Image: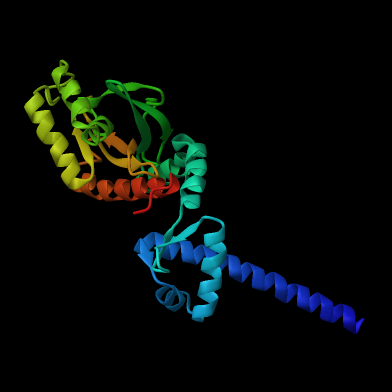
Amino acid sequence: MGAATQGSGRQARGAAGSVQSVDRAVSVLEILARHGETGVTEIAEELGVHKSTAFRLLGVLEARGLVSQEQDRGKYYLGPGVLRLAGAAASRLDISQEGAPVCRDLAEHAGETANIAVLDDDAAVNIMQARGSSSVTAQNWLGRRTPLHATSSGKTLLAYQPKSVQESALTRKLPRLTDHTITSPAELRAELKSVLKSGYGMARDELEIGLHAVAAPVRAHDGKVIGAISVSGPSYRLEEEQLQEVAKRTMAAAQDLSRRMGYAY
């Protein structure tokens, strides 16, 4: 009985040691991701372990292609194996699936309707929607194509596109939907610059009178903007002060969703 107990104890300690090694190996990858490249001494210090332990961890990761080392036994950096794994993970990430809980949480905290939109040629298409406690409208934006120049999501998506895509959109006619809709290419160009500077886009009575909205960009693992998450509501509830506060929440949600899509801020 005593021998069995001792054996069980050794197995438990062995399992705990294996888990700790895995945790440390992942920490090594995170350290290299933050610093780009660093030496074994610095890695050991961040891990709080002896240099020999860090060296063993790096050796295992290097053997699997997850870590590489400069010539002449220099500093370590992330290896091609990480790119292979990241590519496989990114290909399985779906913005609507990953965005569902983020969209619901944003709607709950903002108390208004939250949407996730993607670019589709000359329009923004809403692929995800959630309603907050203050949202009483029965209007459904899901699946709707909305104009780029008159919506917060559209402006945000367009602002982060290559210049050629932007200029193509600016050469098209910009229909006037309300008295507040931007129909001048020069004004829209200035608006897109403002989005890049502030990190969010706004629309005030531009798609519909009485409707205000704010949107922020969602990025993929490579930094490319692949979507926009927005909050919209009636203008009497989303006046300027409220819009600024909602903009902060929306940008935080966009960062959260971007991280879920593999982007590291």
Residue 82 lies, in percent from the top left, at 48, 52
Say above or below: 212 vs 23. Answer: above
In percent of the image, x 43 and y 32: which residue is there? 128
**Viewer-closest of 151 and 110:** 151
**Viewer-closest of 75 and 33:** 75
Say above or below: 147 vs 28. Answer: above
Examine the rendering and report whether any part of residue 116 can be seen. yes
In percent of the image, x 71 and y 73: which residue is there? 14
- State the residue lying farthest toward the front: 72
In percent of the image, x 31 and y 45: which residue is there? 250
Say above or below: 97 vs 140. Answer: below
Say above or below: 103 vs 39. Answer: above
**Viewer-closest of 45 and 101:** 45
**Viewer-closest of 74 and 129:** 74
In percent of the image, x 37 and y 28: which residue is there? 126
Residue 262 lies, in percent from the top left, at 43, 47
Examine the rendering and report whether any part of residue 135 can be seen. no
Residue 103 lies, in percent from the top left, at 42, 41
Which color scheme does this rendered protein use? Answer: rainbow
Q: Is residue 88 left or right of residue 181?
A: right
- The quadrant in which the C terminus is found is bottom left
- The quadrant in which the N terminus is found is bottom right
